[in-house]
Amino acid sequence: MSIPYYALDISDSIIDRLEGNPAPHERMALATGSLCSSDQERLGLCVLLASDEDKFVAKTAKRTISSWEIHRLSDAIHRQTHAKVLEYVLEFLEYNESLDQLIFSCVQLNERSAMLIAERASIHTCEEIVKNRQQLLLTPSILTVLQKNENCPEEVLSRIEAFLKMQHALPKEGEQVSVRTDHTGPAADLDIDIEKEVEAVLSGQKSPFLMLALSSSLDMFQLDDQGGGSDFSFDFSDVDGFDFDVDGEMTEQGFESLEKKIRDMSIGHKIKLAYKGNKEARSILVRDANKTVAVAVVKSGRMTDTEVASYAGNRNLCDDVIREIARNKEFTRKYPVQVALVTNPKTPVNVAMGFMATMHKKDLQALMRNRNVSSVISTAARKRYKDKYQKS
């Protein structure tokens, strides 16, 4: 099994330790998260080590993240958190309504995790689910699960059904969906002294936490006490049944073949491809007639600076794509993107005006002569040019 360390937020220094055949006491220290630089890294590492062949290490990793408060766990989860990390949190840690809602908004959420959330969703969570159109298209069978959830209001079910019907994505009638009903997690009853663990590693001594566990004869290293283990898989290469090969450069013939394959895809698979595909796939999907698919390309976090600038200036893309780019501060701090947005007539005028102050002389001159932009923009460019470069 190939381990996607970077996708798990694991740093190079920790990767070197993991791949360097660490001694048992060092592996135990890793399982406590004491050598990590952030909670994002600790979470990914502990979920990874929860499947370690060494039962002591596996149990320690599980106990580490089980001891976290909800707010700490929430802060460690971000939109791109690995799907298996999200699934582990849902499966083994204590249920929390706000945490379920946060996880449902993560773009890497796999189908099983979406089902688990829908199955136990409160009224409020159901109302949040219906707002996430992208996730509904990724996992349309979630409707089947919600229909069995007594907490789900009829109004929510009707809205989801109407949306999926409009998108031609309604789950097939009689489709069987299997989800778990037991989501209890283990109690965290051991305290780990982070400083002592670090000192032990640096001095080559055994883990104090491990020694305490052994000397106390605690029955804490049984791997079958987590609940739900029969359904959860520690396969970090799992891509939720999505095995479309889209890596690497592509010939013209290959591009045409890719276009045909994408045309035949369901909306859900197109969205998945938007997050996992290469630039050729993105260049096709960003032009998709379905706005949710097109916007998913922008939200994927995979676009290069060149792609962003190209899409920002493309008048043939839907308004939603342009607005999504304009809302992203990481994108708009790049000057080429600012210029592209200002010169694109689909960019809202108030947004384009906000970039006017940063325009260079030659770009202001071009904007003054640009007949494709709003007269408001060209007039503002002319005024800006006179104020800055033609002062008497």
Image (tube, rainbow, N blue to C red):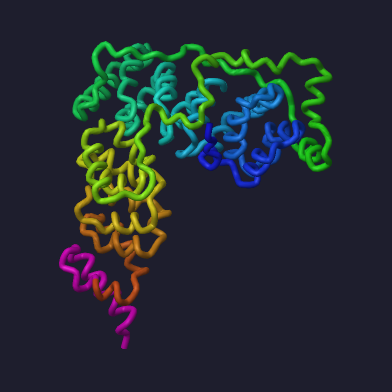
In the displayed structure, does residue 391 sit left or right of residue 102? Answer: left
Residue 227 x/y as whole percent: 57, 14
Residue 263 x/y as whole percent: 21, 37
- Measured along the vertical axis of the image, is residue 38 above or below residue 335? above
Residue 193 seen = no
- Measured along the vertical axis of the image, is residue 156 above or below residue 354? above
Residue 385 included in the magenta stretch of the image? yes
Q: Residue furthest left?
A: 371
Q: Which residue is drawn at 24% across and 42% down?
A: 257
Residue 121 x/y as whole percent: 42, 19
Q: Nearer the viewer, residue 204 or 71?
A: 204
Residue 261 x/y as whole percent: 24, 37
Q: Which residue is drawn at 34% across and 47% down?
A: 298
In the displayed structure, does residue 353 sit left or right of residue 216? Answer: left
Q: Residue furthest bottom?
A: 392
- Identify the magenta region: 367-392
Q: Nearer the viewer, residue 163 or 303?
A: 303
Q: Main secondary structure of the magenta part?
A: helix
Q: Residue at x 47, y 26 (%)?
A: 100
Quadrant in which the C terminus appears = bottom left
Residue 391 included in the magenta stretch of the image? yes
Across the whole image, how many numbered discs are drawn on residues? 0
